[in-house]
């Protein structure tokens, strides 16, 4: 079969013969195609994360340029992208098999232009109604939704032996969009990057000028380039086609729901800590100038996810996940210790170090839990659907694992709202964040038990 015969359909980019687990096929044709799709997907996902959480920086600057919003109003602007992004993920989870990975990646990436341009224009008008900002915050959820479809898409391209590492690279470098945004936006708002085209600067209440519109505008050219790259450079896989009804079988699968809990423990923690770490650090250590360091947390988590997928491929996702949750319990205990001595010299750096280790653990766990899902369904489908032939069972397992990857990421994304909210409620009710942190430890203990019982003990239902 010639290389060209692999393609037909729209713009010659539909793969009609895709067998990544066939070693000859993978070596001759599959690897190059899969790598091209992966490395177009990664920057698109990075931009999605940047747009999703851009409000975490923008809201801090709104009062200084004349927006008379209360603290509670600012909190909702920061929180709503987490709620809408998580909710959109539920729907995005099922889009790739319906529309195709190439089409959906291009469409979903292009949709980021709406909130990016909207923020850029809205912040230039101090009399802009609050409702407009609420709408723009909700629309930033487009960025959060993209993760589910991106991960489901990439899962179709790689064989079992390298799926964990591919998903870790896509997710880890995509997650880096949070850190990139928290580093880039404070820089670009200090200069007229786009000249007269970008609009006039705003005058700060304490003097000086900023171009807050650049927080939105800076992403526009990159979104356009990424959209074009996806449309012209990626592929749709014909065998990955499935209706929502076909994919909805995952709601009957016990392991879909168990993995929702475990992935909430890993990715939900990563995105929640990313959103809440700046607030917690400045609230508990007001003299530490913490904001100049907080971007390092999401960066550590993203890089550890990208760099550690091979560990789960080699040692088993279940075993790695179990020890990740043990490590997270220890790290949160360390955070609690340093909060208890926060008046002593050096306490901030101990607190900061514990959070860096916590972010590191969430990254490793993000990779290991996603590695588990394809393994689980590859083993589970033959038992659940013995009437199917071997090739059909493999395809069914791929479809269900892709849908589960997307759906679990949707549920876990609510961490972007609930972790910061837990901090706020704990501080309001008890005067400190300790109650929230003890609650997190309790949840991680549940995750340890679930992982051990279902996936790692000697007589586990599915050892992985």
Image (cartoon, grey):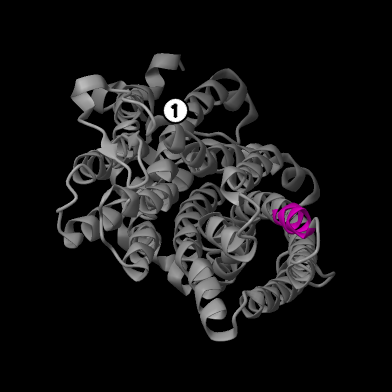
Q: What stretch is highlighted in magenta?
A: 347-355
Would residue 353 be counted in the magenta stretch? Answer: yes
Residue located at (36% from left, 53% from top): 59
- Quarter of the figure with the C terminus: bottom right
Left or right position of 31 against 400: right
Q: Where is residue 420 in the image (x, y as percent from the top left)?
A: 51, 67
Confirm whether residue 16 shows in the render.
no
Question: Magenta segment, principal secondary structure?
Answer: helix
Name the residue located 63 percent from the left edge and 59 percent from the top edge: 376
Say left or right for 206 vs 424.
left
Q: Where does the image place residue 220, in percent across and percent down from the top left?
A: 29, 31
Q: Where is residue 137 in the image (x, y as percent from the top left)?
A: 29, 55
Which is more toward the observer, 199 or 179? 199
Task: Choose between 358 and 377: the one closer to the eye.
Answer: 358
In depth, the one of 73 and 254 nearer the eye is 73
Residue receiving disc 1: 40
Residue 452 spot, x, y in % from top left: 77, 71
- Up/down of 119 relative to 208, above or below: below
């Amino acid at each position: 079969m010639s290389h060209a015969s692999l393609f037909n359909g729209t713009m010659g980019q539909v793969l009609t013969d895709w067998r990544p687990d066939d070693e000859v096929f993978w070596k001759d044709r599959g690897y190059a195609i899969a790598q091209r799709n992966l490395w177009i997907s990664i920057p698109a996902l990075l931009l999605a994360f940047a747009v999703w959480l851009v409000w975490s920086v923008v809201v801090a600057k709104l009062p200084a340029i004349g927006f008379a919003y209360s603290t509670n109003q600012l909190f909702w602007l920061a929180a709503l992208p987490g709620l809408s992004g998580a909710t959109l993920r539920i729907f995005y989870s099922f889009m790739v098999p319906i529309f195709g990975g190439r089409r959906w990646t291009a469409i979903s990436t292009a949709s980021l232009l709406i909130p990016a341009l909207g923020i850029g224009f809205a912040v230039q008008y101090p009399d802009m109604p609050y409702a407009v900002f609420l709408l723009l915050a909700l629309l930033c959820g487009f960025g959060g939704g993209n993760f589910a479809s991106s991960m489901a898409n990439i899962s179709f391209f790689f064989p079992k032996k390298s799926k964990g590492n591919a998903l870790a690279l896509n997710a880890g470098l995509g997650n880096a969009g949070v850190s990139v945004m928290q580093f880039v936006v404070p820089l670009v708002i200090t200069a007229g990057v786009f000249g007269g085209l970008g609009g006039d600067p705003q005058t700060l209440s304490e003097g000086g000028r900023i171009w807050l519109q650049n927080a939105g505008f800076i992403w526009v050219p990159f979104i356009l380039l990424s959209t074009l790259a996806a449309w012209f450079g990626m592929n749709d896989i014909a065998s990955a086609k499935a209706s929502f009804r076909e994919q909805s079988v995952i709601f009957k699968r016990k392991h879909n729901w168990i993995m929702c809990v475990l992935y909430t423990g890993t990715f939900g923690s990563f995105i929640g800590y990313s959103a809440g770490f700046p607030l917690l650090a400045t609230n508990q250590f007001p003299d530490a100038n913490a904001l100049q360091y907080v971007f390092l947390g999401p960066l550590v988590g993203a890089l550890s996810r990208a760099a550690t997928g091979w560990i789960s491929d080699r040692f088993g996702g279940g075993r790695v996940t179990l020890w990740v949750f043990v490590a997270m319990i220890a790290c949160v205990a360390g955070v609690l210790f340093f909060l208890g001595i926060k008046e002593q010299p050096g306490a901030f750096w101990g607190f900061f170090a514990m959070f860096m280790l916590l972010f590191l653990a969430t990254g490793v766990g993000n990779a290991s839990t996603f590695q588990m899902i394809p393994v689980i369904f590859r083993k589970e489908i033959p038992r659940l659907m013995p009437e199917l032939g071997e090739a059909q069972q493999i395809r069914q397992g791929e479809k269900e694992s892709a849908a589960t990857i997307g759906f679990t990421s949707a549920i876990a994304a609510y961490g972007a709202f609930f972790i910061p909210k837990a901090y706020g409620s704990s501080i309001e009710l008890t005067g400190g964040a300790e109650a929230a942190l003890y609650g997190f430890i309790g949840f991680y203990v549940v995750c340890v038990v679930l992982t051990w019982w279902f996936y790692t003990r000697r007589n586990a239902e599915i050892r992985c």
